[in-house]
Amino acid sequence: MTAADIISKCDRIKPNVYSQSQKRDWLNKIETDIRQYAVLYSKDEADLSFTNEENPTMYLPETESDIYVYYLISMIDLSNQEYKLYNNSAAYFNSTLQSWQRKHRREIKPICDISISY
């Protein structure tokens, strides 16, 4: 799934006045966070070269595209100062992102030693 596909899906769900460029900037922010999280437990570095592309292929598969779409929707609501709508869309976004993060942690085996101290 590409950035243009996600923006198009978002625009169908929530028509808005924001430019494609602004929505791409928002997508770049969440995509960077996702890619950095994906390599968190490895010795690899996140591939951030997608920021130089006009229409990059996103890291998450189409089945997880709600994460991107609802991030855009929440940013639109926030920018429109529609705070009640923002609270709802941000809560859904956070829920879907956390579900993916939990699933990702279960599926990968950490390469580096990780210790948690309290």
Image (spheres, rainbow, N blue to C red):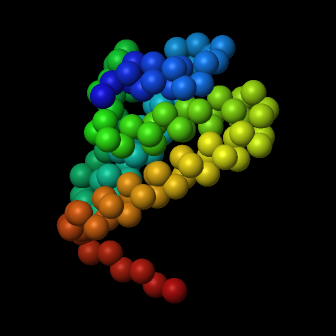
Q: Position of residue 18 (x, y in %)?
A: 63, 16
- Count of residue discs: 0
Please tell me which residue is depicted at 52% across the width and 55% down the height of the picture.
95
Can residue 92 be seen? yes
> Is residue 103 positioned above or below 57 on the image?
below
Please tell me which residue is depicted at 42% across the width and 58% down the height of the picture.
99
Q: Position of residue 31 (x, y in %)?
A: 42, 38
Residue nearest the observer in this picture, 22 or 116: 22
> Is residue 105 positioned above or below 62 on the image?
below
Residue at far bottom of view: 118
**Quarter-wise, where is residue 17 in the image?**
top right
> Is residue 112 positioned above or below 100 on the image?
below
42 displayed left or right of 81: left
Residue nearest the observer in this picture, 95 or 113: 95
Residue at far front of view: 13
Q: Position of residue 116 (x, y in %)?
A: 42, 80
Residue nearest the observer in this picture, 13 or 3: 13
From the image, which quarter does the N terminus lie in?
top left
Please tell me which residue is depicted at 70% across the width and 41% down the height of the picture.
86
Can residue 25 be seen? no
> Is residue 31 positioned above or below 114 on the image?
above
**Quarter-wise, where is residue 73 in the image?**
top right
Please tell me which residue is depicted at 75% across the width and 27% down the height of the picture.
80
Q: Position of residue 90 (x, y in %)?
A: 62, 46
